[in-house]
Amino acid sequence: MTIFSRAFRAASLSALLTGAVLAPATALAQARPPAPAPDRVPAGAPEPGKEIALTQAQIDGLLAAQPELAKLSGAAPDKPDPKAEEQAQGQAEAIVKRNGFESLEAFQDASDTVDAVLGGIDPETKSYVGPTALLKKQLAAVQADKGMPAKEKAEAVKEIKAALAAGESAKPSQGNIALVTKNYAPLSAAMGDGEGTQK
């Protein structure tokens, strides 16, 4: 996977964050299975970036770049087009540089670091509790949901239990937790979980 594909994946962030982000409380009842956490990415998937020490400037740059990156279109997955992907990669590189990042790789490292923290923030309390606590909360909500079809519930429970069994990656640094928590509303809105629009 190219650097652009990795950054574009981060920009669309329908999956932010590749971390196990807990859906907002209203979506808990719908029991969407969690996305795999960075340490549980399936074989063949790109490896998550390293944790970096975030700055407010990086958070601001990430928030500014996200909407622009989301508008880029690369080649269709079923019809790879190296020329279109190369052009989109060049555009993505220009966007992230314009927003204060040295490269797409630096942008992705910042995005992955934010993902790791967001994946452990409880959307109700806006405090970092870790992905395991959120998965347990999600599991309890799924198991208590009487309206969910049995087959769907069983699959969701199985996936959540598998994510719990895989364990948790190292806890992000306190500095990163504090900075992402401070910027939780705009980050969660930009990263696609919709919680940032609620107070």
Image (cartoon, rainbow, N blue to C red):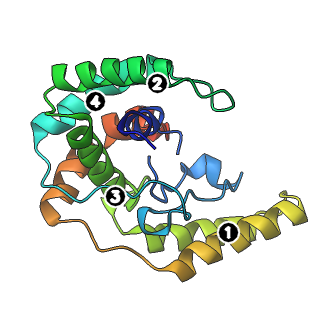
Pick whichever of labels 4 and 3 is earlier in the sequence. 4
Gap between marks 2 and 3 measured at Cα: 27 Å
Mark in the foreground, 1 or 2: 2
- Name the residue tied to disc 3: 116
Q: Residue at x 58, y 59 (%)?
A: 34
Query: Callout 4, which amino acid?
Result: Leu
Q: Which mark is residue 159?
A: 1
Asked if residue 167 lies left or right of residue 144, the reply is left
* First in residue order: circle 3 vs circle 1: 3
- Tag 2: amino acid: Glu
Q: Which residue is mark 2?
A: 85
Look at mark 4 in the image and give the residue it sits on: 63
Whole-angstrom CA distance, mark 4 to mark 2, is 23 Å
Residue type at the position of mark 3: Ala
Report the side of 124 relative to 178 (left or right).
right
Q: Residues within 10 Å of mark 1 (few under 14, many from 20)?
A: some
> Where residue 94 sits: x, y (%)?
24, 19
Could you say whether the residue bearing mark 4 is in a helix, strand or loop? helix
Seen from the viewer's position, the closer of residues 123 and 89 is 89
- State the image coordinates of residue 179 (x, y, percent, origin top left): 17, 49
